[in-house]
Image (spheres, grey):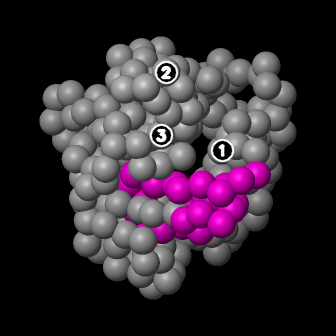
């Protein structure tokens, strides 16, 4: 990511349709597993910090910490007055075993370079999670959906839901919930990207940028599409069959308390 991408991210995280809608989907999936109590939380790849403040809803009287490898991202986090920060890679978390009650990874595993690096990051998440703790992992879906956005962000991989689930299981996790998300827009995005590839045209640049002034109305429409999905996923038996994101909620079994 370029400095401009972090600036856009910082400015858009609060109200841009993607972030606002995906936070509601995250809440729909996490709320049943996180009753009110004090927690220590880690966002493993916190970017410019928009989710750090949002995750405080699950901390109670605890705290929310964040790590990111990029100093520019952490600078923006500090502008949001976040202090529990460390510059580190998700593949080598600078925390003791069993330090956190909740660990989140929002579209970070897809960015880590190196064969097997995403699985190493999953093992690190598992290591620092307390027995009985919860992990929330989201990643871009389907390798064939790579686009100019992925090239701009240097995306290394995308997942099918089955691939994400099995990698988490190999890391030691028990899967509590799994689903795709951003499903209503998936057919439109798929047709567009496949058409561009067939025509040999480039899909340039990151999608995370302000909408043109004459298209601001689209922000509310796109947000409403994700809010519909969030309401649908409040049903614990609901699962979306395809989408732009693959999501797993997982746990570290209490059996590890004895180890």
Q: Which residue is mark 1?
A: 26
In the picture shown, does residue 39 fall above or below 4? above
- Residue 217: where, in percent of width, then height? 75, 64
Q: Residue at x 48, y 15 (%)?
A: 162
Q: Which residue is mark 2?
A: 255
Q: Which residues are magenta?
A: 36-63
Q: Quadrant of residue 50?
A: bottom right
- Residue 141: where, in percent of width, then height? 47, 29
Q: Residue at x 69, y 62 (%)?
A: 60
Question: Mark 1 or mark 2, which is nearer the start of the sequence?
Answer: 1
Q: Could you classify mark 2 by the number of other residues whose Cα lies within 10 Å: few (under 14), some (14-19), or many (20 or more)? A: few
- Residue 19: where, in percent of width, then height? 60, 57
**In contact (CB < 8 Å): disc 1 and disc 3:** no
Q: Gap between marks 1 and 3, in whole Å? A: 21 Å
The residue nearer to you, when weighing 161 against 193, is 161
Question: Mark 3 or mark 2, which is nearer the start of the sequence?
Answer: 3
The tag on residue 79 is none
The residue nearer to you, when weighing 199 against 151, is 151
- Residue 75: where, in percent of width, then height? 34, 79
The tag on residue 130 is 3
Q: Residue at x 69, y 23 (%)?
A: 240
């Amino acid at each position: 990511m370029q400095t401009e991408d972090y600036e856009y991210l910082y400015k858009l995280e609060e109200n841009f349709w993607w972030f606002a809608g995906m936070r509601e989907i995250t809440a729909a999936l996490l709320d049943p597993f996180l009753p009110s109590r004090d927690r220590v939380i880690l966002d493993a790849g916190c970017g410019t910090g928009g989710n750090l403040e949002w995750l405080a809803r699950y901390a109670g009287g605890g705290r929310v910490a964040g790590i990111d490898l990029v100093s520019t991202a952490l600078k923006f986090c500090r502008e949001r007055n976040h202090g529990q920060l460390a510059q580190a890679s998700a593949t080598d978390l600078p925390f003791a075993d069993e330090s956190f009650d909740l660990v989140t990874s929002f579209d970070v595993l897809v960015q880590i370079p190196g064969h097997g690096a995403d699985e190493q990051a999953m093992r690190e998440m598992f290591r620092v999670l307390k027995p009985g703790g919860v992990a929330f992992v989201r990643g871009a879906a389907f390798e064939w959906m790579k686009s100019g956005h992925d090239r701009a962000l240097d995306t290394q991989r995308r997942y099918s839901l089955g691939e994400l689930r099995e990698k988490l299981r190999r890391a030691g996790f028990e899967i509590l919930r799994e689903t795709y998300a951003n499903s209503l827009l998936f057919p439109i995005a798929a047709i567009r990207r496949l058409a561009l590839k067939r025509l040999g045209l480039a899909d340039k640049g990151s999608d995370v940028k302000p909408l043109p002034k004459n298209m601001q109305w689209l922000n509310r429409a796109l947000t409403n599409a994700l809010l519909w999905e969030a309401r649908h996923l409040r049903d614990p038996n609901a699962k979306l069959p395809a989408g732009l994101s693959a999501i797993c909620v997982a746990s570290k079994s209490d059996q590890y308390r004895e180890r």
